[in-house]
Image: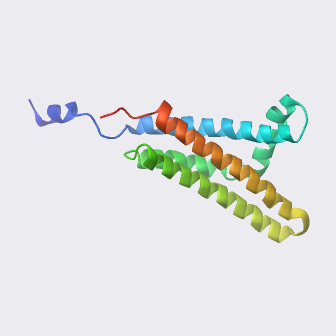
């Protein structure tokens, strides 16, 4: 037996890059679905039709306030999942939560800068951004929990 054959038979301690990337894509999709449901629920509290709240006003609220933050967040989620794939469970959850909260804070800070430049009622954008960033961050943490501990749970050693 050669050394490569014995080495190949030892199971890897970390998931493959493909599995990590698949988990990241599932997390991104779950985050967007949960955030849309959260924003739709918020719009439903404001009154109106059920379908209009979840299919029109909720997604419009998210897109109009977080459009510039979601693509960098998605790229960071994939990079973090692949680069630090050896971290499992709570470590990866903490990394993904940090990325989500950091991006949400940057989105709020960006709207604050816009409000300071515009003045007047533009501070209302900051309040709306705080709410949508909170919905997004909570959705991302829930999605990361779902992915880490249920859908892509690592096998026990």
**For the C terminus, which image quadrant?**
top left
Please give left or right for residue 153 compared with residue 140 in the image.
left
Q: Quadrant of residue 59?
A: top right
**Image point 77% across, 51% down: which residue?**
65
Q: Nearer the viewer, residue 42 or 10?
A: 42
Residue 54's x, y, as percent?
80, 33
* Extreme-front residue of the structure: 45
Color scheme of the displayed model: rainbow
**Image point 84% across, 35% down: which residue?**
53
Residue 46's x, y, as percent?
88, 42
Q: Quadrant of residue 143?
A: top right
**For the N terminus, which image quadrant?**
top left
Please give left or right for residue 32 compared with residue 76 in the image.
right
Residue 20's x, y, as percent?
44, 39
Please give left or right for residue 157 compared with residue 60 in the image.
left
* Extreme-left residue of the structure: 1
Q: In this rendering, is residue 105 above or below 11?
A: below
Residue 111's x, y, as percent?
76, 61
**Image point 79% across, 60% down: which residue?**
126
Count numbered badges in the picture.
Answer: 0
Q: Quadrant of residue 42?
A: top right
Q: In this rendering, is residue 29 above or below 85?
A: above
Q: Nearer the viewer, residue 154 or 80?
A: 154
**Image point 54% across, 55% down: which residue?**
98
């Amino acid at each position: 037996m050669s050394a490569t054959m014995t080495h190949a038979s030892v199971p890897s301690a970390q998931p493959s890059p493909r599995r990590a990337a698949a988990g990241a894509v599932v997390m991104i999709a779950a985050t967007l679905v949960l955030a849309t449901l959260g924003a739709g629920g918020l719009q439903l509290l404001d009154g109106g039709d059920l379908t209009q709240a979840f299919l029109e006003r909720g997604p419009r609220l998210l897109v109009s306030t977080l459009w510039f933050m979601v693509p960098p967040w998605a790229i960071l989620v994939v990079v973090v999942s692949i680069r630090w794939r050896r971290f499992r469970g709570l470590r990866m959850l903490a990394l993904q939560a940090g990325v989500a909260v950091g991006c949400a804070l940057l989105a709020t800070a960006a709207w604050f800068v816009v409000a300071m430049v515009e003045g007047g009622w533009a501070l209302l954008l900051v309040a709306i951004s705080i709410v949508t960033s909170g919905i997004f961050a909570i959705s991302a943490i829930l999605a990361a929990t779902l992915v880490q501990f249920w859908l892509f749970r690592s096998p026990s050693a």
